Image: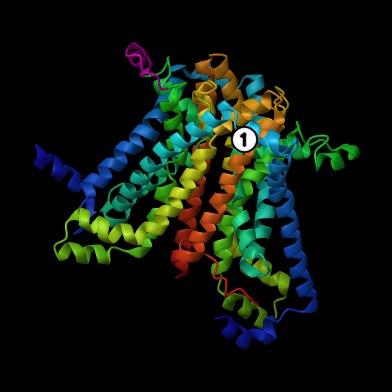
Amino acid sequence: MPTKKANKSWSLVTRSSPLPGFRLSIGFTMTYLAVIVLIPLAAIIQHGARLGFGAFLHTVTAPRVLASYRVTLGCAAVAALLSALFGMLLAWVLARYSFPGKRIVDAIVDLPFALPTAVAGISLTALYAENGWIGRFLEPHGIHVAFTPIGIVMAMSFVGFPFVVRSVQPVLEDLDPAMEEAAASLGANVWQRFLRVIVPVAFPALLTGTALAFARAAGEYGSVIFIAGNMPMKTEITALLIVTKLEEYDYSGAAAIAGAMLALSFTIMLAVNLLHWWVQRREGKRV
Amino acid sequence: MSGHRAICTSAMLRPSTAQKAGRVALILLALLLLSGFLVLPVIAVFTQALSQGWKMYRDSIHQEDVLSALRLTGLVACIAVPLNMAFGIAASWAITRFEFLGKSLLITLIDIPLAVSPVVAGLMYVEVFGLHGWLGPWLSEHNLHVIFAVPGIVLATVFVTFPFVARELIPFMQAQGSDEEVAAVVLGANGWSVFWRITLPNIKWALLYGTILAASRSIGEFGAVSVVSGHIRGQTTTLPLEVEMLYNEYNFTAAFAAASLLTLAAIVTLILKKLIEMTSGVHRHMDEKEVES
């Protein structure tokens, strides 16, 4: 038996290697992946499927749930767009210019990755509330941020924009100056160089970063719930609705909505992977 | 490189006054947005925490609930992070040292936790270990508690930090290649001595980098942990959950005091990350000398 098993796992290997430890490392990897990720994921999908198609559809298209999709996806889309603009600006400045304190700025960009989302949530709420440092300047102009969709967009942009910076920055740094120099020597001005030389190279990375920012924003919970106000139909995000269903012991409802969110997550993941594949193929062709 | 550039292209790319002004304007705009959007929230945390004076701040932090939340957060990180380090090393060894079927699928599967909403992540474990879940009846028969208890919090934390170490190690070990390890094996070293003497010393900075990212996330995780915790004060509240509970009780000063501890952890994380980037070459995408102009 052991030899048979060994042969079987060995047949997975498509090119032999002199190094040891394949079976141990792949065995541990697959077991751990199954226990932590795949089996729990299957449990939620199975619960969603157990409901039957009619009940599932009824749950995920209830008016309050549909309103939560509108809030979540709408705010996430605006946040992704803002992240793309702000992220592109920062990536450009960090990749192209040198200025005092640049290393500190580069480190600070990762703050939203490191700062716990609950802390970001209460801090942004304090800043944008009526009497907050920023809110007190906006309120007199009739701009309400805290407890409105604008607040949700602020929180989502906060967690999303580092994805854009970290996707675009390496591409801009690797861009061969010779390409721009060639364009300049042929008479291209600054804008032409930017639009014709830099944008085409950086665009796939910008798209990837924006997609990641959107995915993060759509799934975000901690930083949003404090600033959102959580009014059903108006400022209630889908992730919060899952928590609400759970608190009402409506496990099937929670599983169904989670199934809808998973479908979105996997679609974005697939899109990003296809984008990578396309870029690699394009670059392969160019060489 | 920069000297070479300056000589060849000084005539073509020398910035005009207008371009220099544009450059300064872009840098200032970026700095302004960054300070308003990122630095101000951090300052606000400390200002709010200290708004009632130092004594109040100290008392807020020394409350028994906050201290026990701090202990639980530390405990969870101490279990979750080593598990994910072991996984990261095993996965990157298999992926970068061998060619096998389904490798790119495996790399994609490792990224799943990054795409899943934290709330959905927490719910997944409720579906497996909760009272109505797959193992729920069996667990309650044997009086074992996973959901609304510490094991559930650990599992949720392991899930959200799952890819961090692996994602640092895979590209790093891929770039490094396996020549040294193959040489050692050919000369008769056994597997574990290759690992301890060659692989581990080679990957130590990337491993540390991934570990710091995982530790930082595990200390700060909120959504996934919130779903499985049950919010039992003094027993299943981690520090981020304690922040939420204090905040929802309108105990703002105490909430921000607890939040200030998490913010300090985040600042330490950023400093350590930058130090590793600067000393080891891990993730050093910007060559500081080259862009000076």
Which amino acid lies under the numbered mark 1 shown in the image of this protein? Ala
Q: Would you say residue B140 sits in the magenta stretch?
A: yes
Image mark 1: chain: B
Residue located at (69% from left, 41% from top) = B45
Say whether residue A278 is visible: yes
Residue B207: image location, x then y, percent? 40, 53
Residue B276: image location, x then y, percent? 48, 60
Residue A222: image location, x then y, percent? 61, 34
Given residues B98 and B125, the one toward you in this image is B125
**Considering only vertical position in the picture, is A17 above or below B47?**
below
For the magenta stretch, what is the residue range?
A: B135-146
- The image quarter in which residue B7 lies: bottom right
Given residues B189 and A231, the one toward you in this image is B189
Say whether residue A46 is visible: no
Q: Farthest residue toward the top? A: B141
Residue located at (52% from left, 55% from top) = B272
- Regarding mark 1 in the picture, which secondary structure is present there? helix
**Considering only vertical position in the picture, is A142 above or below A234?**
below
- The image quarter in which residue B271 lies: bottom right
Write down the residue under mark 1.
B258
In the image, is A47 to the left or to the right of A160? left
Q: Would you say residue A230 sits in the magenta stretch?
A: no
According to the image, what is the colour scheme of the structure? rainbow
